[in-house]
Every structure is written in C-alpha cells, then in structure tokens.
Amino acid sequence: MNTEDNPLLSMSGLPPFSRLRPEHVVPAIEHIIADNLKQVDTMLAANSHYTWENLVQPLEDMDERLDRVWSPVSHMNSVVNTEALRETHNDCLPKLSHYGTAMGQNVTLFNAYRSIADSDEYQKMDIAQKKIIDNALRDFHLSGVDLPEDKKARFKTIQEELSNLTSKYENNLLDATNTWQKIITDEAVLSGLPESARALAKQTAEQKEIDGWVFNLEFPSYIAVMTYADDQTLRKEVYTAYATRASDQGPHAKQWDNSPLMEDILRLRQESAQLLGFDNYPQRSLATKMAATTTQVLDFLNDLAVRSLPIAKKDYNELETFARDECNATMLDTWDIAYYSEKLRQKKYNITQEELKPYFPDDHVIGGMFKVVGRLYGITIKAVEGIDTWHDDVRFYEIRDNKNELCGQFYLDLYARPHKRGGAWMDECISRQRRGQELQTPVAYLTCNFSPPIGDDPALLTHDEVVTLFHEFGHGLHHMLTKIDYPAVAGTSGVAWDAVELPSQFMENWCWQREALDLISGHYQTGKPLPQDMYEKLLAARNFQAGMQMVRQLEFALFDFRLHMEYDPDDKFDIYGLLDEIRDQVAVIKPPSFNRFAHGFSHIFAGGYAAGYYSYKWAEVLSADAFSKFEEKGIFDSETGKHFLQTILEQGGSREPMELFVEFRGREPTIDALLRHNGLVA
Ligand code: ZN
C-alpha cells in the first residue's frame, strides 16, 4: 500500500476512526519504525556535539509520532475488538517491543544523552527538560544498555515474548468473558432481580433473537445476579463461570486456559529483572516508582492489614449472624456473600443502589460533574457534535479555561457491550506538545462499562458507577489540564505509577458531598436532586463492610507483590498455594478451590500493575490527605482548587510526586485521612 493512501500516516488532529482498517496498521507501524531508526542513525552520525535541539527534541517528536498512530489502534483493539484487528495488533507487538529495546540498548545514543547531562546546557534547562533526560538515562539502564551483547539479545527476546504473552492473556480473558451466557425462559428464576436487571437481560436476549432473558459475564449483568438473584443455583452457576474464566476449571475449562501464560510471564519477568542486576521483579518495578524498597511496600500493606483485619472480621461475623438468624442460611458460600450483604445493607440503612439509580441519569451526572470541576478549576466543558468515533454511543467534549482557551478534548464511551474489554480506564489519544508557536492540546479516551440505556429511558447509573466515572475523569483531567509542553512528562506520562492514582481517587470524594450531589443528581422523571434522607442513608452506608473491602484490596496487593517476589520457576511454584497463604493472613472470605481469580487478574498479568497493585492504596494515602485540605477549607474553595490544579494536575510527570504533594499540602503525607475515610479509626 502506498503510504499516502494510509490514513494512519496522513493523520493530523483527531484519528479518522471510521476510515481506519486493520490492513492499515502493520504498514504504518513498520513505516514509522523504519523511519525513526534511520533518523536516529543520521542524527548520531551528523553531530559530534549533542544538544536538546539536535537530539532530544527530534527523538521526542519521533516517539510522539509513533504514539499518535499506535494509540487509536490499541484503543480500538480494546473497545471494538475483531479477529482481524486483533491479529494485526498482535503482529505489531513484537515489532514495537523490538524497536523499544533497540532504542534503549543503543550505546551511542546513550552516550549522547550522557554528554548532554554532563554539559552546561543541562544546567540551564527547565525542570521538565531535565526530568526527561534523567528519566531517559534511567530507562537506558532498565533496557539493558550496560549488558554484554549476549545478555542484551536475551533481554530483547524476553521483552518481545512478554509483550506477546500478556496480549494473549488479555485475549483469552476477553474470549472467555464473551462466550458464556445463561438463557432463562422461566420467569420464576428471576426472583429478586430488580426491574433494571431484568430489562437488560431481556434487551440482551432480543438483540440475539433469543426468547426469554440472557445473562452474561459483562459486569452489569454479573453483578446484578450476584447481588439480587434469590435463586442460589443461578448465583452459583454465574459465579462459577465468572470465577473460572480463562482457566483449567469451570464450564469452559481449558478452552482459553491462561495457566501456561502466567507461568511464562512470571518466569520471564524474573529473568529480565535478574539480567539487569535486581534480585527480583518487584525491585525492578520500584526502580520507577515513589516507594523506595520492597520492604517499605510490604510493611505498608501489612500495617494496613493489621489495622483492618479486626474490623473485617467484625463485618463478616455480622453478615454471618444476619444470614443465619434472619435468612435461615446455615452457611455462607462465596456466591452468597454479595447477596446477603445487600440484604443486610438494606436492613441497616434501608437503601439500595437500585433506589438511587433514578437520581443518576447519565446526562445529568455528566453535566453535574462538569459543574463540579468548573467550580474547582475555573474550566468549562461542552459537547462537540459531528466527531468521527468508533461507535455510535461515543460522545466527545472539549475543555476550555477561564480565558476560553482550549485545554483539551476527550471521548467518552460509557456502556458495556460485547467485544469491549471490561473495567474502566483512561487512555491517552494525543499528548500536549508545543512546537515553536504551535500548541497541540491533549486528547483522552475515557472508557467505562456501565449498564446501557434500556428502552426509551436514559442510562441510570448506580452510585458506584458515578464514583467510577469521577475516578476516570480525574485521570482524564490529569492528562488534559497539564501545562507541560513535552509529551514524555506531560499529564500522566512519566508520573510514578504509585502516584498516578492520586488525581483519580481524589475526584471520587465529591460523589459523597451534599453540595456536589446537588449538582450531580437529578431524578430522571422529576429532575429533583437526591433527597436529604436518602443522602443521609447513602452516607451512613458508605463504610458498610469497609473492613472487608480493605482486606480484599490488600489481599490482591500482597498477592501481586509476593507472587512476583517469591516466584521460583524451578520449584513447580504453586500460585494458588501462595494466594491461600495470604488469605490465611489477611482475608475473611475463602473462595472455593475451583476459583481461578489469578487467571483473570489482568491488572498484573496484562496491564501495568505488575508488582504495582499496591499503588492504589499507596496513592490513596496521597489522595485522602489531599482531599482533607478541602475538608478543612471547604470542598468548593476556589483557592484550594486552583492550588491543586497548579501544583498537581498541571505539573504532570515533570517533578517528583513527593515534591509536588508537599508543595500542595505544605507537609509530607500522613495516613490519618485514609484511615478516617475508611472508618478504620474511631
Ligand atoms: Zn485509576
């Protein structure tokens, strides 16, 4: 194909999604990679004195060009996955990995960067430029630039294999999630399920031209059955399918089994870390994070576990007693926990997510969220029509500052649908960059998996979903409100992974504030905001089972960290044995032996959280403490909002997170606010 005919290579501005075809991908990526490699050689040969202008800036531009093209491809692979797209996406992974390592292991290039770091020019650079050079030097080492040739080659092979393996892991999970469904024709089986869940199942059945109701493993369907279905057999069946996805167990046992991939991923991560001179993979993981040592991370998690376990046990005892005494349940199986918990929540607080939903129609929530950040940061956000996207459900918005200057834009893709990866996340489409007089503003993708609209009603969100939306929007604002002009450290780029959840978890807090809820909530029929009595119940129920929630997150974090630390390929390592051991230490719920949680733990096996899942709790110390300043000054205090904008959101990855936090808070973080918000102190 001619490069001029390839829309990926003639892009300016937003990606032309409707014109992108799988056959465009490989030629575009190959073209840019070849071009970049040639350009690097030319630059290195042409100069003997290296500067920002003749070396770093051109390299930043090359990276940016590759990211711009890869971003829509990888995004579409996640949200409108097809066989053809997946194949071409996978074809590119080894090429990209190969390219990344080749650049990272280029000794001449490394020496050129070193000469700049040692020059007078470096001393005169701004903070962001210095950070880019410091990060680059660090990353050369982490790509194996210092290794002898044979080890360099091995390192490169490992990176390539890892990129294939993690992608296969994710695809297995997506296929396993997509394939299973439960058709119900006897309405009696639906007993307990609220109208919205029935309607969604009915709509899913109609779309497939099936009579009755269809439940699947997409989150809105799964969670409704687990929370509300009176029929224990149905709950057990759905739980079993969900908890055994992509494994050797359950209804599709061994069909998309991630077991061998997990072994290979762990083994190769360990080998690559050891090649670089680390004792284990977590040490390698921490080389780019805020936490300094593996001991520091384990102590942090264990300390939280000690504080929360007694409360978790109390939560669990209460649930067990309630189920036994008031529901005649003699024992609690794992598929009973959410169900009886919901009954107990209703009894204690007399409120359900179902009753809250009519107050959170998606348009109203989104509009309210824009007002909240408008008051905090002085920005305005409005929808833009007629933008080319990958699906009809997708909306597009632009953000302007108080001088009406464009700050950034974003796509919002709210609803669950087949062939869309589960969960919620923010991803970068375009990064902020200044080229001479010209400013390129950032663009983000915000992706969720909420219940779609049913019939003629708008999509009604649960309060949990509202919190998720605020979370992802927090990441989005971090990316879009940055004032840093270099993509490598603009927005969320270059931010230590264990600090990157600060802006997102921080935003969640507004979902619990009366004054903010007046803006966010509005009954879809009457427009009335959430009534005060319901608000009080919502607040009272906020820390319902907070101990159980906390130890669950700690179980995941400890499992991730210790698994990567202790994994031994020569020892027929028992992954689930380790998980059991951790559960003995911190958990109050012991799932059945067929549970294959780790086979679907894509955060650590396919995402960026390997030996990094602790980041959520780590950053929650920062986000809770940052919010406590708003508790002191007022949640809409514009001075404090402006200060947060300037010290945290605008700075991106240009400075160390601790430095930025101290500048905002006036001191180092303490754990007090996190404990208080989670009800872990009196
Ligand atoms: Zn997040």
Image (cartoon, rainbow, N blue to C red):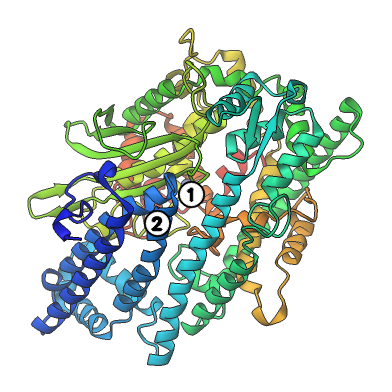
Measured from the top left, where is residue 39 in percent x and y?
Answer: 16, 74
- The answer to whether residue 80 is left or right of residue 235 is left
Circle 2 is placed at which residue position?
A: 657
What distance separates the C-alpha of mark 2 from that of mark 1? 10 Å
- Seen at 35% across and 74% down, the residue is 98
The reply to whether the C-beta atoms of the residues labelled 2 and 1 are less than 8 Å apart is yes
Mark 1 or mark 2, which is nearer the start of the sequence? 1
Circle 1 is placed at which residue position?
A: 622
Q: Nearer the viewer, residue 46 or 485?
A: 46
Measured from the top left, where is residue 9 in percent x and y?
Answer: 19, 56
Measured from the top left, where is residue 138 in percent x and y?
Answer: 35, 74
Q: Quadrant of residue 401?
A: top left
Measured from the top left, where is residue 265 in percent x and y?
Answer: 56, 70
Q: Can you say whether 492 is above or below 285 in the image?
A: above
| Rendered-image quadrant of the C terminus | top right
Q: Can you say whether 234 is above or below 427 in the image?
A: above
The amino acid sitting under disc 2 is Pro
> Is residue 680 at least partly visible in the picture?
yes
- Seen at 71% across and 60% down, the residue is 248
Q: Can you say whether 443 is above or below 281 in the image?
A: above
